[in-house]
Image: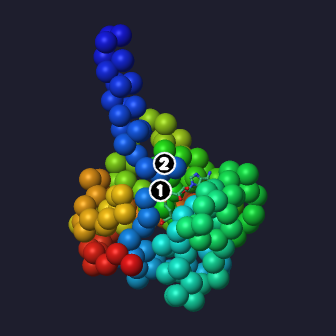
Amino acid sequence: MRENNSKKKLFLNIVREDRAKNDVYPTPKCAIDSLLNNESFEGNIWECASGEGHISKILIERGFKVLSTELREDRTVFGEKGIDFFKEDRKVDNIITNPPFCLAEDFVIHAIKCTNKKVAMLLRVGWLESKSRYKIFKSTPISKIYIFSNRLPFYRNGVWYPSGASFNHAWYIWDKDYKEGLPKIDWLIHTNEIK
Ligand SMILES: C[S@@+](CC[C@H](N)C(=O)[O-])C[C@H]1O[C@@H](n2cnc3c(N)ncnc32)[C@H](O)[C@@H]1O
């Protein structure tokens, strides 16, 4: 038993060390285009972990009023720097982001508190499981899940790999008008366009 636990710890450490610092994985253009081509958003949008602005820039191009904030402060950051989402109590119409995977649950809970209309989060399909999320799903029902049938392009060490992600991704939507019921599911094929 103890041996199993230490193996698990070793594995988790390897996985964690392998992940980019702060979970900095930018979103390819095809992912955000697919969302906007299928789901409507009214009012302003907060990209609350904006990174280099991969999502924000497309939202702005599409004519949305966008607030971009990011924890990191390096020169590559797009938007307001040094802003820890969890310390913010701003209220907006919508939040769209690809959150750091290791903090995804907390991002969802806080985003729901900060919005009047919709929250859209890019997460792994497998995020649907787990005992710890049961409560979130039951208390704040997901209205829609858009599953990518083809894998998204993936960025690693300065290089984009087309359809290279090792996980399936989906857009999860929470809509304030959707107070009870089960999520609708749809499937998307993206174009592989990166930026
Ligand atoms: C997976 S990356 C995605 C970046 C961007 N949303 C995109 O889609 O291209 C996650 C981002 O969350 C940022 N982040 C991590 N913790 C944060 C926090 N507490 N508040 C705000 N941003 C945070 C990371 O620095 C990183 O830029």
User: Which mark, by number, is residue 21?
Assistant: 2
Q: Position of residue 170 (x, y in %)?
A: 37, 61
Q: Position of residue 90 (x, y in %)?
A: 75, 63
Q: Is mark 1 within 8 Å of ligand 1?
A: yes
- Secondary-structure class at tag 1: loop
Q: Is mark 2 within 8 Å of ligand 1?
A: no
Question: At 48% from the left edge and 72% from the top edge, which residue is drawn?
Answer: 54
Left or right: where 5 falls relative to 81: left
Q: Is residue 117 visible?
A: no
User: Which mark, by number, is residue 40?
Assistant: none
- Nearest the viewer among 195 and 74 is 74
Quarter that holds the C terminus: bottom left
Q: Is residue 10 above or below residue 51?
A: above
Q: Is residue 157 above or below residue 146?
A: above
Left or right: where 38 falls relative to 62: left
Quarter that holds the N terminus: top left
Left or right: where 54 falls relative to 49: left
Q: Is residue 38 above or below residue 26?
A: below
The amino acid sitting under disc 1 is: Val
* Residue topped by disc 1: 24
Q: Position of residue 80 (x, y in %)?
A: 68, 67
